[in-house]
Image (cartoon, rainbow, N blue to C red):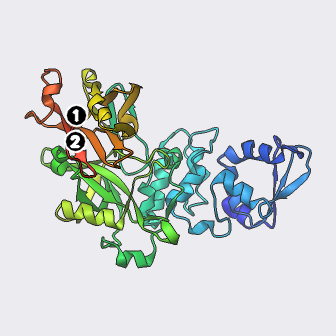
Amino acid sequence: MFQWYKGSQVCYAYLADVRQGEKLYSDLRKSNWFTRGWTLQELLAPSLVGFFDHDWNDIGTKGSLEELISEITGIDNFINFEKACVAQKMSWAAKRITTRVEDMAYCLLGLFDVNMPPLYGEGEKAFMRLQLEILKTSDDESIFAWYEIEQTDGIELRYGLLASSPKQFKYSGCIRPVKIKDHANGPLKWEDRPFSMTNKGLYISLHLIPETTFRPFGEDWFIVPLKCSRAGGKGGWDSCPVIRLERNVVDHIERYGRAPITGIDANEKVVLLNDKGIRHQIQISKGSAQKYIYVKEFRFRHNWPSTLQRWEFAINASLLKGHGFVASQYAPMDFLCTWGDSAQDEISLVVRSVPGTVAGVLFTNTKTRESIVLAIIVHKIHPPCPGSALIPEVSIPYRYRIILVSIARIDTVLI
């Protein structure tokens, strides 16, 4: 169908829920035509698309309405859309729906120039097959630049590198192919190595940078920069999407799974590191290794006891307030913790009892411009650590470390 539309001289789109008048643009933004999966190829493939309203009045073309359609769909270049990376193309379909689950994959075949037979009844497996077909002809690592963390009743899910739905690329419209010059100037040596799917999972070569933010994870957690970019300042390409992998060893066999990353930007939901950040991670982790690994393409779970779901800390800030410090900002690290400040002198910080959780409150003095950060980090260690005496005595391997960090010079530590 994609090739059929591409070969047409003109394609007419009838928008039954749009009427000319003062609400024309408002109706266009709400039109179901821009939410259906199959209409994406009808929009992109033809060189000329004419739009008609409920009464068959001509309301414009893809060219004349380009700015508005770009705002609605997130597609910023209709002429060279084929040069977009996999993640960006997937983001165009993230908010679209189809009647059948399988059609969400089938309607994208032409966009990625791949072929595969339809097998209605396979459900979400269709989208998995689509990604595998894409990997057969492309080494675009942006296909792994999706984001989703599911958590229910103390259960965290781990994934493979491939997504289960285009919806997981909702925040990936900012991803772009990496430029050739960035291959040479970047901190990592990118090598073109093939991917392959085996009975052990996806066999792929990646840069594994040991996670050093949370020492208790040791050698089991890795930060993995992907070979794609996001536009930076002044048109530069200085940000690299990052994922985290967790290594599990069972019977001396290594298995990797995709793990959540804390500290995710609430607006973008895509974790990014610039060249400086990557170099810093490599330096503090004493090097980066690029090697072939197997990553599972199915979910596996970690069960956390429900009794460890949350801990609440009451932070007495009256002494800090007396010296001119007030709580000005907090870092709940996405879904892992929350806080409230119903009373100015006492701050309630609720932290989830999952290793790697970080909660923090920033106190600032507007007169002296000095700052203090109170950080609470959940560790996965057996020996007690500083601050563990504040936690009720329970027989669990989790302890909390409470750190007071000075961002600027502070004469006296008050907490």
The disc label shown at residue 238, or none: none
Question: In percent of the image, x 28 and y 22: which residue is there?
Answer: 306
Residue 292 appears in the figure: no
In this rendering, position of residue 235 left or right of residue 307: right
Residue 275 placement: quadrant = bottom left
Residue 25 appears in the figure: yes
Question: In percent of the image, x 61 and y 60: which residue is there?
Answer: 110
Question: In percent of the image, x 12 and y 36: which residue is there?
Answer: 386
In this rendering, position of residue 249 left or right of residue 225: left
In this rendering, position of residue 152 left or right of residue 318: right
Dot 1 amino acid type: Ile
Residue 304 at x, y percent in the picture: 26, 28
Up/down of 352 relative to 287, above or below: above
Look at the numbered discs 2 and 1 and tell me whether their residues touch, using CB distance below 8 Å: yes
In the picture of the structure, the residue carrying the numbered disc 2 is 404
In this rendering, position of residue 214 left or right of residue 100: left
Considering the image in quadrants, where does the N terminus appear?
A: bottom right
Question: In percent of the image, x 35 and y 35: which residue is there?
Answer: 336
Residue 330 at x, y percent in the picture: 37, 39
State how far apart marks 2 and 1 are (Cα).
Answer: 8 Å
Dot 2 amino acid type: Leu
Up/down of 174 relative to 247, above or below: below
Residue 381 at x, y percent in the picture: 13, 37
The disc label shown at residue 415, or none: 1
Q: Earlier in the sequence, mark 2 or mark 1?
A: 2
Considering the image in quadrants, where does the C terminus appear?
A: top left
In this view, the residue in front, 33 or 342, is: 342
Badge 1 density bin: few <14, some 14–19, many ≥20, Cα 10 Å = few
Up/down of 195 relative to 268, above or below: below
In this view, the residue in front, 280 or 140, is: 280
Q: Residue furthest left?
A: 383
